[in-house]
Amino acid sequence: MKIISNPFELKEYLKNKNETVGFVPTMGALHEGHISLIKKAKEQNELVVVSVFLNPTQFLKGEDLDTYPKKDEADKHICKLSGVDILFFPKAEDIYGDDEVTINAPKVRGFVLEGNSRPSHFNGVLTVVMKLLNIVNPTRAYFGKKDAQQLNLISLMVKQLFMSVEIVAVDTVRESGGLALSSRNAYLSVHERQEALKISASLHSASMMVSKKILDSKEIVKKMREILSPLEIFYVEVLNRDFEQISHVEIGNTVILVEVKVGTTRLLDNIWL
Ligand code: AMP
């Protein structure tokens, strides 16, 4: 496995490669969720590039940029074991300069749900993803369905800016109890980890209701909020795949999203129905 930190060196290295390239962008502290993206990329491409970059611009002031779990050596080891060809490990100054050109998230979809409580978050996400895609120029790029709003906005950016990369959505990997894997789970105490199970329990209950033909969004949200109580809820929403509110679940075109605070940790999850 080759480790490169300079964007120009990586561009140069990839320039004359004729192989298909699968790209998995991450912020590190890799877990089985990230590994499933890497596996998918390996299945579908001849060359796999993973980036580990804790992107400062997607954190708001006072958020956890400085305390975000950092496991550089373990990440390198995991990438090597997972058969990654190139690990891109830039520093912030390799990616950002002064007086930056930035991508603005769309005015509606970028500022609802997670974007409502973290207003500049998706500007930072789209800007770094644009930069990374331009550096790697992959055939396909892999993103988790767990971050459904992020996936939706990246797909929208790629479409609206006529970019040629294919965006591949990968299913959420969970612990056996149902908790979606996340680097931020490392912040949870034993008690909080137990409390966090309410998130997947609420989503499970929604999918049970739908299987019993209870499709009314309000009824589903009410039940989910009961299960999530007393956690602080940022949102529970039933949306179509274009992220518009719908009064009833439309099978094959619905995503139900939750974001809550457990202790001091924001956790998000969703199901696609
Ligand atoms: P992060 O390092 O948190 O920025 O995540 C990097 C990528 O991994 C994103 O596309 C996430 O959506 C994806 N990801 C994170 N957690 C999971 C999970 N539990 N299952 C599948 N993909 C995930």
Image (spheres, rainbow, N blue to C red):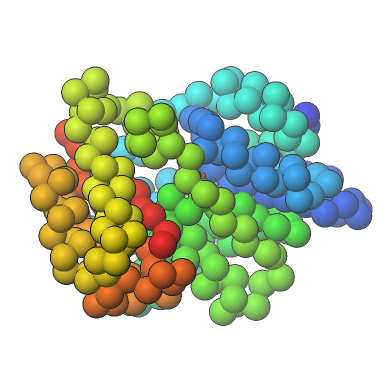
Image side of residue 73 versus residue 80, left or right: left
- Single out the residue that lies furthest toward the front: 212
Q: In which quarter of the image is the N terminus?
A: top right
**Residue at 16% over, 45% down:** 228
Q: In which quarter of the image is residue 119?
A: bottom left
> Relative to residue 232, is residue 130 depicted above or below?
below
- Single out the residue that lies furthest toward the left: 230
**Residue at 30% over, 28% down:** 187
Residue 101 point in image, percent of width and height: 52, 67
Which of the pair 152/6 is nearer the observer? 152
**Residue at 8% over, 42% down:** 230
Residue 110 point in image, percent of width and height: 36, 69
Residue 196 point in image, percent of width and height: 25, 35
Image side of residue 107 versus residue 157, left or right: left
> Relative to residue 231, is residue 249 depicted above or below?
below
**Residue at 87% over, 52% down:** 19
Q: Quadrant of residue 191?
A: top left
Residue 141 point in image, percent of width and height: 65, 55
Whether residue 166 appears in this view of the structure is yes
> Relative to residue 10, is residue 186 depicted above or below?
above
Whether residue 61 appears in this view of the structure is no
Q: How many marks?
A: 0
Q: Quadrant of the C terminus?
A: bottom left
